[in-house]
Image: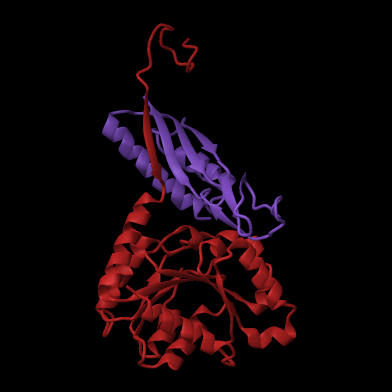
Amino acid sequence: MHEMSLVQGLLAQLNELAREHGKEKVISVSMEIGPLSGVVIDSFQFGFDILAKDDALTREAKLIIESPPAIYRCFGCGREVEALQRPERCSECSETLFSPQGGDGLILRQVEME
Amino acid sequence: MCDACGCDLKPEHTHDSKVVEVHQSLLAANTAMAVKNREHIEKMGAVAINMISSPGSGKTTLLEKTIEAIGDTIRIGVIEGDIETDRDAERIRAKGVPVVQLTTGGACHLDAAQVHKGMHLLEKEEGGAELDILFIENVGNLVCPATFDLGEHHRLVLVSVPEGPDKPAKYPKAFHSSQVFIISKTDLLPYFDFPVEEAKAEALQLNPNLQVMALSATSGEGFDQWLDYLRGVCRNRQ
């Protein structure tokens, strides 16, 4: 459950951003959490719901999470497909080995504050 | 009442809201520290290997037997990560190499900042500043440690025979972020249903670049390949 410590890091960063911009309330937080990031989105959301309530700054903040697909490159023919899960086999050459590229992002994209 | 937010101010008021574009990884601070760790290790002329596995897969035993087998030919140092106790560090210390125990006090993984601290502590141990290989034994956990770069050059994931062959499929992140997959405790193969070739094939499906080794620290089976790998790691360092 490393999601909790990641949420703690996020909240610390939100506090810094609010101080930097002279704001007192976070309205929304947009995150990208890729399917290969090793982070369970439900656990991250759960951690955020609990920990954000402890701070007046984030008490009403809405967490928006997007999970863009990874690109899987076929080891046989080099064909690339976008997918949330590793494909079983290549539709071109039936190869079962793929190397994933991207999809491992755990990125704070945007914060709306007032 | 304001339609936009439900506050009690007059409808014509404007909220002084601001959208800040950040586009930064939540792991940015950890990654920056990991980069520093890597530079620090390289300055020492050493290579760091981060060992990840479930509890009880045999990480510490593998290290004990490796130190015994390698003797003085490669200078080894160890950073031990555990939630509590310094038992693992005691086992390594008994083998006569510099070691530091990090206890996370509940956290399920090591992060780069802890390892940074550990490296400085290790340098105070006799021989801890002149290493060829720094092993970082992560907290026993196949999930969380996979997300955190510690500044290692190689990441090694271990699965022991009694755990069963389906770990790569169940814990993919540890396998696609590693360079080496070790199947340990092969001396127990006669007593468990662990098809080695199937486990290898499944791991390679997740990460075709994985180097796979099967070994037993107890019987010594497969140990030559492991020691060759470590010698290669030392030869190829920058």
As rendered, which of B67 and B223 lies closer to the eye? B223
Q: Position of residue A69 (x, y in %)?
A: 58, 44
Residue B234 shown left or right of residue B157 in the figure: left
- The image quarter containing residue B167 is bottom right
Whether B96 is drawn above or below B10: the answer is: below
- Residue drawn 27% across and 81% down? B130
As rendered, which of A50 and B133 lies closer to the eye? B133
Residue B58 shown left or right of residue B103 in the figure: right
Viewport quadrant of the C terminus of chain B: bottom left
- Residue drawn 35% across and 64% down? B114
Whether B34 is drawn above or below B184: the answer is: above
Q: What colour has chain B?
A: red
Q: Position of residue B176 (x, y in %)?
A: 55, 61
Number of marks: 0
Q: What colour has chain A?
A: purple
Q: Position of residue B183 (x, y in %)?
A: 60, 78
- Residue drawn 67% across and 86% down? B188
Is residue B78 in sight in this rendering? Answer: no
Residue B45 shown left or right of residue B174 in the figure: left
Q: Position of residue B156 (x, y in %)?
A: 50, 71
Whether A14 is drawn above or below B149: the answer is: above
- Residue drawn 47% across and 18% down? B5
Is residue B92 in sight in this rendering? Answer: yes
- The image quarter containing residue B53 is bottom right
